[in-house]
Amino acid sequence: MPKYGFLGLGIMGTGMAANLVRAGFEVTVWNRSPEKTAPLVALGARVAATPKEVVEGSEITFAILSDPSAAEAVFFGPNGVLTGLSDGKGYVDMSTVDAGTSRRIAAAVAAKGGRFVEAPVSGTKKPAEDGTLVILAAGDRSLFDEAQPAFGKMGKKTMYLGETGGGAHMKLIINMIMGGMLTLLCEGIVLGEKTGLKPVDLLEALDAGALANPMFKGKGGMILAENYATSFPLKHMQKDLRLAVQLGDEAGQPLYGVAAANETFKRARGQGLGEEDLCAVYKTIKG
């Protein structure tokens, strides 16, 4: 039975690590806020004091951190991942970051004789808990293959997207589409209300036609219930939209719709909605 490490026990990481522990794997966890390790310990996980200690005691270490700066801090920082790596060890970063961040980490892993895979995930809190995420992996193929038992417990589908950077690009493109769609849904609900339509009727019409999709149904229902309990923090969607705009700049591709959605989410963050679910952008659009 492989020994796994897991770094980052936030909204996503807690459910993902729990699925590994429940599957019977030996899992060592670490989180910047130690109290968040308690539910995993109750399930049977071990706790380490530093990322270095996790890596040293694990064959493959998984991480899911909030943004590029957090991913680099945990990797390059004092007693970080890099200090615990040695020949053959695997590091799988499941954070949503830009390709440049992934490539810097990949190069540092290789310099220590380790192997690296980036594997950002498509999905939010409930899919993380249910083990039904979509895993978008790229990097070292041998590590990708060896990580399949763990991937199979965390996700319903795992894709291999070639060299490091492919996974990061795919995740940013998926999230930029999601952010744009949610912005338009909220604008549609507000416009409908101002022209005398009931939001519940709009959602029913959308769900009956070609535009039906789980996000409209789920987030639309949350908006109608005024339920903004966080499964995907609004601040993280804004970060992903920002990184997507940056990717468009690098590729020389104009992204008019995404740039507009990013500005809407930036305004929502400025209004103090960053910790709420991303569908709280509705409150900004409604005004």
Image (spheres, rainbow, N blue to C red):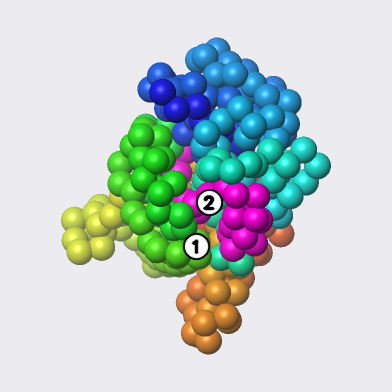
Q: Could you say which is closer to the camera, residue 54 or residue 179? A: 54
Q: Could you say which is closer to the camera, residue 212 or residue 31? A: 31
At label 2, the amino acid type is Phe
> Which residue is at 73% across, 31% downward?
50
Q: Is residue 157 magenta?
A: no
Q: Quadrant of residue 156?
A: top left
Within 10 Å of disc 1 (Cα), the crowding (few <14, some 14-19, many 20+) is many
Q: Where residue 116 is drawn, which disc sits there?
A: 2
Q: Quadrant of residue 210?
A: bottom left
Q: Could you say which is closer to the camera, residue 250 or residue 242? A: 250
Percent coordinates x, y for residue 3 in the rendering: 50, 27
Q: Is residue 118 magenta?
A: yes
Q: Residue furthest right?
A: 78
Q: Is residue 163 visible?
A: yes
> Which residue is at 44% across, 58% downward?
138
Horizontal arrangement in the rendering, residue 120 relative to residue 77 (left or right):
left
Q: Could you say which is closer to the camera, residue 165 or residue 182? A: 165
Percent coordinates x, y for residue 183 in the rendering: 47, 64
Quadrant of the drawing holding the C terminus: bottom right
- Above or below residue 40? Residue 152 is below
At label 1, the amino acid type is Thr
For the residues bearing labels 1 and 2, Cβ distance under 8 angstroms: yes
> Which residue is at 30% across, 46% downward?
157
> Which residue is at 53% across, 51% downward?
116
Percent coordinates x, y for residue 199 in the rendering: 36, 54
Mark 1 vs 2, N-terminal side: 2
Q: Is residue 229 visible?
A: no
Extent of the magenta region:
101-125
Residue position for label 1: 164
